[in-house]
Image (cartoon, grey):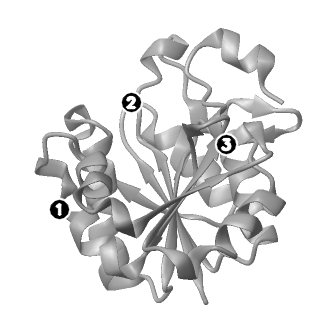
Amino acid sequence: MSTACIILAAGRGSRMGERNKAILRRGSESFLECIARTCRAANVEEICVVVAEPHGEATRQEAQRLGLRCLENPAPERGMASSIALAFAHALSDFHASHCWLWPVDTPAVSPASVRTLLARADEAAIVIPCFAGRGGHPSLMARAVWAELAACGDLAEGARSVLRRDPARVLRVEMQDAAVVQDVDEPIDLEILA
């Protein structure tokens, strides 16, 4: 089984005071670097970062430093679903993997062991979602069978959630021991409690 990863890094960071989350630091690494390192430790073969203004240039520079490809979202004001749709349309034509991680850049602390745990369950469902204490988190693992639906999610009322809810039988929620799967860094206080 081969895997790719789409890192969503096109947000404005409005709740973070308009700060660029991709280059926020966790220890000595940027959030983008943390995720890239984890992906590589779990043998992810292709990584693409979705970027947009106002932080596009700084995120592209960091991605370039890390050897990652970027995809520009020209209409980030349409929300996260627009980035997801754009990325999976790209994945359908450019990725050779059988599965793709969908990974928001503000969830940087997930361990390689957790990624491997989720990957081990990939044959059980088209969509694998990590959970902690019953709460769904990130990154989610998407089989190629659902990529076309995700590529069309930009116009759906609930975006990617509409795809997840279309057929609950194809979604596997895996309870994890890693609280990092639900640790989104949305506000400055979240930086202080990040593991």
Q: Quadrant of residue 1?
A: bottom right
Disc 3 versus disc 2: nearer the observer = 3
**Is residue 73 in sight in this rendering?**
no
The tag earlier along the polypeptide, 2 or 1, is: 2
Compared across the picture, whether 106 is left or right of 165 comes to right
Q: Which residue is mark 3?
A: 181
Of badges 1 and 3, nearer the viewer stands 3
Name the spot of residue 108 as percent of width and height, x first: 69, 42
Q: Residue at x 81, y 69 (%)?
A: 41
* Depth check, front residue: 37 or 1: 1
Q: Which residue is mark 1?
A: 152
Residue drawn at the location 27% of the way across and 36% of the way down: 79
As drawn, the residue found furthest toward the front would be 169
Whether residue 87 sits left or right of residue 187 in the image: it is left
Callout 2: few (<14), some (14-19), or many (20+) C-alpha neighbours within 10 Å? some
Residue 109, horizontal then vertical, whole percent: 76, 42
Q: Which dot marks residue 192?
A: none
Q: Along the line of sight, which residue is nearer the eye, 114 or 29?
A: 114
10 Å neighbourhood of mark 1: few (<14), some, or many (≥20)? some
Characterize the local packing of mark 3: few (<14), some (14-19) or many (20 or more) Cα atoms within 10 angstroms.
many
Secondary structure category for the residue under label 2: loop
Q: Specify which label sits upstream in the sequence, 3 or 2.
A: 2
Three-letter amino acid code of the residue under disc 3: Val
Question: In the rendered structure, which amino acid carries the disc numbered 1?
Answer: Ala
Closer to the camera in the image, 42 or 29: 42
Q: Which mark is residue 54?
A: 2
